[in-house]
Amino acid sequence: MKRMLVFSAHAADFVWRAGGAIASVCAQGGQARVVALSYGERGESGELWKDPKQTIERVKAIRHAEATRAAQALGASFECLDLGDYPLRVNDKAVERLIEIIVETAPDLLLTHAEKDPFNPDHPVTYQAVEKARQLATGAGVASAFRTVRPPELLLFEPHQPELCGFVPTLFLDITPVWEKKQKAMEAFASQGYLRQYYSERAAHRANHARRIAGHKNIERAEAFQRVLPQVVRSL
Ligand SMILES: [Zn+2]
């Protein structure tokens, strides 16, 4: 029964990149909390801006509804800090909020974006802010002066073009049993419908890689993640 906390730069990123992981944790009786730093209202809502009378507030409201539906399909909660996008700016107050969220959630698993992305200015900003908040929430500095939590496992989700983001998968998750839930969550995002096929194909490719590595022939869909910190085990 794990607690998962997902920091998504924009309202939909968590679905494409970690929807299966979120659904897996929830299907096993765990809890998942998705926190978007921004709605992606300007940079990742292309379909909505085809309406010439569109407004920022209306786009945000639609994205909030889509993300809430997607999170529900996976079994997670959704909230958005609404910090703005393209560029996303995370000031000191927002970092404090991220720390509070980590401490109050006390997650076993923390998921966010990779460190680099030459095509997206907001995803690395999210990584930097989350990484700082993670360190402060887990006891960097003088332990007795801060309220801290046990360090969660930190996993980075797969960027759109992994090779160009320095992303090397170190963990494949079999999401075959929850694939339908991820599909449903992806369908909730009419504002980025063009990504559905792309991430369906990616999940099939990653399943091929996972089958090859593990020899489990029944993996049909998988998600890739990169561990940041060494795994600590009591036995091999
Ligand atoms: Zn994004």
Image (spheres, grey):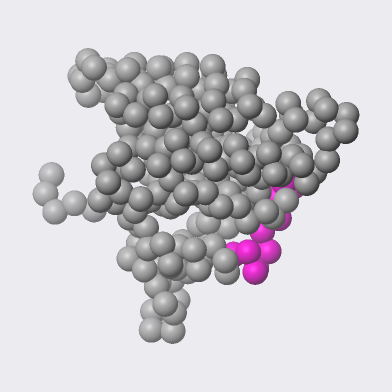
Nearest to the observer: residue 14 or residue 210 = 14
Q: Position of residue 89 (x, y in %)?
A: 71, 55
Nearest to the observer: residue 47 or residue 127 = 47
Nearest to the observer: residue 171 or residue 164 = 171
Res. 234 image quadrant:
bottom left
Horizontally, residue 224 falls left or right of residue 55, namely left
Q: Is residue 82 visible?
A: yes
Query: In this view, which residue lies farthest toward the right?
Result: 52
Depicted 64 relative to depicted 48: above or below: below
Horizontally, residue 219 falls left or right of residue 49, namely left
Name the residue rendered at 43%, 45% in the picture. Answer: 76
Nearest to the observer: residue 85 or residue 189 = 189
Which quarter of the figure is the C terminus placed in? top left
Q: Position of residue 218 (x, y in %)?
A: 23, 17
Query: In this view, which residue lies farthest toward the left?
Result: 235
Depicted 183 relative to depicted 59: above or below: above
Name the residue rendered at 41%, 62% in the picture. Answer: 105
Total label count?
A: 0
Residue 88 part of the magenta-drawn span: yes
Q: Main secondary structure of the magenta part?
A: loop
Name the residue rendered at 83%, 27% in the picture. Answer: 51
Residue 82 part of the magenta-drawn span: no
**Magenta stretch in the rendered image:** 85-95
Horizontally, residue 115 falls left or right of residue 226, namely right
Name the residue rendered at 38%, 25% in the picture. Answer: 179
Q: Position of residue 73 (x, y in %)?
A: 45, 35
Q: Is residue 231 visible?
A: no
